[in-house]
Image (tube, rainbow, N blue to C red):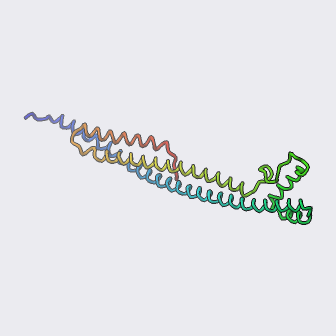
Amino acid sequence: MKQQGPDKSIAAIARHAAFEPIALVLLSLATVGTAWCSYQAATWSGRSQRLMNMSAASSRRAATDQLQAHQMALVDVLLFSEHINARAATNETLARFYSDRFRGEAKTAFEAWMATRPFENPSAPPHPFVTNLYQPRLLADAALAEGESQQRWKQAGEAGRTGRSYVLITVLLTSALFCGGTASKFDALWIRRAVLGLGLGAFVFAIIRLLSLPVQL
């Protein structure tokens, strides 16, 4: 049987030994990266949940403000109707009684409506509850709350996508850890190279993805 020379044995050992520091560096960096990405994934997931809760709270506040605004508008319309009925009956005392009880927003709209001389001017608004005259504060608050809810919901979606991206990177780094830990276990040199190269590729791709993501401290 043909014996291998000592030079060939030394060269083979050197080739095998070259994998150890590369695999060690890969394992070290991938371990740190996995811990960091796991932390970021949990942080962004928590942020997404908080923003969703805030969005839901704003949406409920908007719905409450809208309901109260409609209830107050109903009261305003009833008082205005009674005022018009009293005025039509030439009962100025009763008409003034109702007009004095208009709420601030309704009173402002009513005064602006009366300034248009609605009983003499045919082009005047038909009633004081048109949009450019009657502007309830609760409806404005509801619109602001609804806008805030939509913004929070959008931010929650972005935070959730960022958290899922960190989870994906964690999976890639875990794959790199596996490849780095098992590459040196194979006897065939080409298998070692393939497994280690696969781990390095996964690590590099994960780092590229990681650098494009925002960080939550």
Point out the residue furthest to the front here.
Answer: 89
* Residue 194: x %, y % from top left: 29, 38
Which residue is more in the foreground, 11 or 177?
A: 177
> Can residue 115 be seen?
no
In the picture shown, does residue 54 fall above or below 97?
Answer: above
Which residue is more in the foreground, 180 or 15?
A: 180
Which residue is more in the foreground, 149 or 196?
A: 149
Q: Is residue 128 left or right of residue 69?
A: right
Residue depicted at 18% across the width and 37% down the height:
9
* Quarter of the rendering occupied by the N terminus: top left
* Residue 140: x %, y % from top left: 72, 54
* Residue 54: x %, y % from top left: 59, 57
Residue depicted at 38% across the width and 50% down the height:
31
Residue depicted at 42% across the width and 52% down the height:
35
Tell me which corner region of the image, top left, top right, bottom left or bottom right, holds residue 3. top left
In the picture shown, does residue 85 fall above or below 151?
Answer: below
Residue depicted at 42% across the width and 43% down the height:
206
Q: Is residue 12 left or right of residue 80?
A: left
Which residue is more in the foreground, 29 or 100?
A: 100
> Can residue 53 be seen?
yes
